[in-house]
Amino acid sequence: MAEFLLFMHADATRETTLADWGPYIAGLQSSGAMLGGSAMGGGTTARKTGTPGPLSAGIVGYLKVAAADLAAAQALLGGNPVYEAGGTVEIRELPVTG
């Protein structure tokens, strides 16, 4: 089983609430796909020398999920409040380690 990060962007076309997340997270948990996640606040970028790249301010949260492949990870978006509200969810596969 592969692991993926779902990055929620702050570009939903309608407002979402914390209550919208309960059923979606419960569904991921009951399916065994949910591995973790959190909302994200502000931050900064750093670089040892030179000017660092810009902060990705549009990313406001993430979920870590398990899925067989990229298509299966994308299938987990049904019910995601950001996705359902017309927003962007970026899906990134984590490299296999060990």
Image: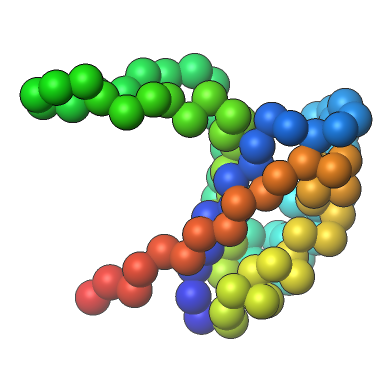
Residue 22 vs 57, above or below: the answer is below
Residue shown at 25% from the left, 25% from the top:
52
Count of marks placed on residues: 0
Is residue 39 visible in the rendered image? The answer is no
Is residue 37 visible in the rendered image? The answer is yes
Q: Quadrant of the C terminus?
A: bottom left
Residue shown at 57% from the left, 79% from the top:
69
Residue 29 vs 9, above or below: the answer is below
Residue 55 vs 5, above or below: the answer is above
> Which color scheme did the rendering employ for the protein?
rainbow
- Which image quadrant is residue 8 in? top right
Residue 93 horizontal/vertical position (percent): 47, 65
Residue shown at 28% from the left, 72% from the top:
97
Residue 6 horizontal/vertical position (percent): 60, 52
Residue 38 horizontal/vertical position (percent): 58, 37
Residue 15 horizontal/vertical position (percent): 88, 27
Left or right: residue 95 compared with residue 78: left
Residue shown at 80% from the left, 34% from the top:
12
Residue 46 vs 87, above or below: the answer is above
